[in-house]
Structure formats: structure tokens, C-alpha cells
Amino acid sequence: MSITSEQSRAARGLLDWSQTRLGTRSNLSESTIREFEKGRRIPSPNNLAAIRSALELAGVEFINETGVKLRT
């Protein structure tokens, strides 16, 4: 399953993470995260999976096609 730029921003907000921190946790550059979240480019499927995995490992749960919440 993929992840949208809106979900990425929302998940970072829930975790109080910067784009730099998400980049570090997903082994991607800050510019990759920034460009994705601004809608300027869509990362490769592997990079999207890395972003999602980093957020899930931190406790974010992806709901429906557009939502996120913290795992309880």
C-alpha cells in the first residue's frame, strides 16, 4: 500500500517529527521528503515504502486511503 503526501505530513505532525528526522529514519534525504510533501515529485515505490515503514515503526497507523492516527 502506498502513502500520500498529506498522510506523510499528518503523520509527522502526530509524531512531532521534522522532515529531516523522517529522512533520517527512512534513510532518505530531507529534500526527497520535502519534494514529496510539497507535491513536486513522487518518490519511487521503494522510497515510499521506506517512508511508510519509518512512520509505522514510530507508532503511526494508516487508516483508509487517506487517514493516519497514532496506534493505541
Image (tube, grey):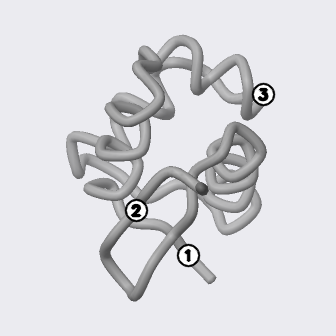
Disc 2 residue crowd, few under 14, some 14–19, many 20+, Cα 10 Å: some
Which secondary structure lies at badge 3? Answer: loop
Amino acid type of the residue that numbered disc 2 sits on in the rendered structure: Val
Q: Is residue 19 left or right of residue 40?
A: right
- Measured from the top left, where is residue 49 in percent x and y? 71, 61
Spatial distance from mark 1 to mark 2, Cα to Cα?
A: 13 Å
Which disc number belongs to residue 2? 1
Q: Mark 1 and mark 3 in contact (Cβ < 8 Å)? A: no
Q: Nearer the viewer, residue 10 or 22?
A: 10
Identified by mark 1, the residue type is Ser
Q: Is residue 4 left or right of residue 70?
A: left
Relative image position of residue 61 (x, y in whole percent): 57, 63
Residue under label 2: 68
The residue tagged 3 is 27
Q: Residue at x 62, y 58 (%)?
A: 48
- Distance, label 3 to label 2, CA atoms, is 21 Å
The amino acid type of the residue labelled 3 equals Asn
Mark 1 or mark 2, which has the lower sequence index?
A: 1
